[in-house]
Image (spheres, helix red, strand yellow):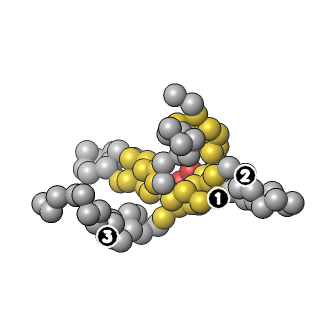
Amino acid sequence: MRAEDTVFVGGPLDGRVLSVLVGVTGHPPKTYEVPVPDPGGGPDTVHVYRREPAGHSRRLGLQQGWKYVYEPEGRSGAPRPKWPWSRGR
């Protein structure tokens, strides 16, 4: 598997660069979740980061990598697309 150094913006990982595995298409996952264990033994706290383009080249406007931006409210409640070949459950 190939990995890409990715910058994290905001939240507890602000300013850190971590190696993130990329998929078959060469892109890292759309969201990155960081579980933090509770010292008291309670449920883990999950910090969510959303993928955004890091920048664009000046002349051709090509995308130059990715960065992860902190989502303070956690996962977005947006419904996923309903594909016609999916079964209703």
Taking the spot 29% from the left edge, 62% from the top edge, the residue there is 83
Quadrant of the rendering where the C terminus is positioned = bottom left
Q: Position of residue 5 (x, y in %)?
A: 64, 39
Left-right relation of 12 to 74: right
Q: Which residue is mark 3?
A: 79
Which amino acid does the dot numbered 1 rest on?
Pro
The answer to which of marks 1 and 2 sits earlier in the sequence is: 1
Q: Residue at x 39, y 68 (%)?
A: 76
Q: Quadrant of residue 85?
A: bottom left
Q: Can you name the residue that lies furthest to the front here? A: 85
Residue 35 at x, y = what percent? Answer: 38, 47
Reading the image, the residue beneath label 1 is 53
Q: Residues within 10 Å of mark 1 (few under 14, many from 20)?
A: few
Disc 3 secondary structure class: loop
Amino acid type assigned to the residue bearing label 2 in the image: Gln
Q: Is residue 52 above or below residue 42?
A: below
Dots 1, 2 in contact, CB < 8 A: yes
Tell which residue pokes out farthest to the top in this image: 1
As drawn, the label of residue 64 is 2
Residue 69, quarter of the rendered image: bottom right
Asked whether residue 14 appears in the rendered view, the answer is no
Identify whether 33 is placed above or below 19. Answer: below
Q: Amino acid at mark 3?
A: Pro
Circle 1: element type: strand
Q: Secondary structure at mark 2?
A: loop
Find the distance from the CA under tag 2 to the CA under tag 3. 29 Å
